[in-house]
Image (spheres, rainbow, N blue to C red):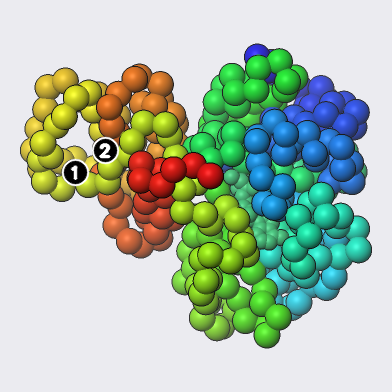
Amino acid sequence: MARCGTDLQTAVDLLQAGRPVGLPTETVYGLAARADMPDAVADIYRLKGRPAHNPLILHFSSVADMRGWVARMPTEAERLFAQFSPGPLTLLLPKGPRVGDHISAGLPRVGVRIPAHPLFRKAIQRTGCPLAAPSANRSGYVSPTLAEHVAGVYGGELTYVLDGGPCEVGVESTIVGLEPNGSWTLYRPGAIAATDIECVLDAPLRLPHDHTQVVAPGMDAHHYAPHTPVLIGLEETPVIEGKEGWITWRELTYPIPAGVVHHPISNRSDLNDAARELYAAMIRLDGLGLDRIRIQPFPHRGIGIALNERIHRASLRTHIPEA
Ligand code: TXA
Ligand code: MG
């Protein structure tokens, strides 16, 4: 099992030695390696069991540091970073000469983001190189929001997880991409609302028109699911079969039935609380040997859009066999 600790220098020394490290971001924990070390990046793929066609996001401490990693920095991208970074926003931009195929999986764009967590930012600065980091879960599983979620997953193969406390946001960054015709597409909803991005762009965001194309492979329908089947909906009293765990973010209109393992994720009906706690609740309930997990849906506004998208994916795992 990986050691969890708060020693930044231990994490940096491992990164410099070409070893992946678990690092906290404000969204979820990442499994990070130096972007200029293909063998270290290959280790991330191997550890996660991540398909080679699924590219990685590069993390920087400033827009200036992206020089050479992106082919150009359009003014809209500068405006988006000025408004929302450091923070939970990833832009897909034409890749620069420094991006090898080990990062972009041979695709024409590279994902770039400036995370807000102070420990992640310091790790980038001390390493002196952008860090490639997918979420630190095994491929297809729920993203980790606590250091201990990461520590247990990789046995002795991962040495160290830098513990930065619970992730403040709790869901992965919003991803928007620049298209060859100059328009922008929303590839993954997140804490930064599409409507706020549209205000900065002064143009509507498109949605990916063809989900079968490998534009953002993480958009495969069966990602981010616990092993226990997930059902959405608690608006009416369900017929309970077997052992159930319920995740709620606001009070139900009926009493919780006896025997149900109840995991509330906000005690004040707050969507940001819910985002912060959702994955930890799913991971905890998944460890209890239940027959199913039911999740109360979220209102379709703000971060609720991202939360509904994530629980929808989690519920699909039940029907779509893993590739
Ligand atoms: O909040 C986050 O973004 C977290 C933290 C650790 O930064 N990272 C994260 O990375 O969620 P990952 O790899 O779990 O999800 C990134 C998604 C994947 O669906 C990937 O396919 C897509 O972004 N992606 C990355 N680079 C891309 C590219 N060049 N073109 C298309 N899609 C890309
Ligand atoms: Mg991920």
- Give the class, few, some or many, for how many residues have Cα within 10 Å of label 2's Cα (few <14, many ≥20): many
Give me the residue at 52% from left, 71% from top: 210
- Percent coordinates x, y for residue 74 in the rendering: 76, 77
State the CA–CA distance, disc 1 to disc 2.
7 Å
Q: Earlier in the sequence, mark 1 or mark 2?
A: 1
- Percent coordinates x, y for residue 232 in the rendering: 27, 46
Q: Circle 1 sits in a helix, a strand or a loop, which is it?
A: loop
Disc 1: which residue: 234
Give me the residue at 28% from left, 32% from top: 292
Return the mark for residue 100. Answer: none
Give me the residue at 44% from left, 43% from top: 321
Task: Tell me: residue 234, above or below residue 2.
Answer: below
252 or 178: which is nearer to us? 178
Give me the residue at 14% from left, 32% from top: 240
- Give the class, few, some or many, for how many residues have Cα within 10 Å of label 1's Cα (few <14, many ≥20): some
Q: Circle 2 sits in a helix, a strand or a loop, which is it?
A: strand
Q: 21 left or right of 215?
A: right
Which amino acid type is shown beneath numbered disc 1?
Answer: Leu
Q: Could you tell me if the residues under marks 1 and 2 are in contact, i.e. CB atoms within 8 Å?
A: yes
Q: Is residue 272 visible?
A: no
Q: 97 left or right of 288?
A: right
Assign the N terminus to one quadrant of the image.
top right
Disc 2: which residue: 294
Which amino acid type is shown beneath numbered disc 2?
Answer: Arg
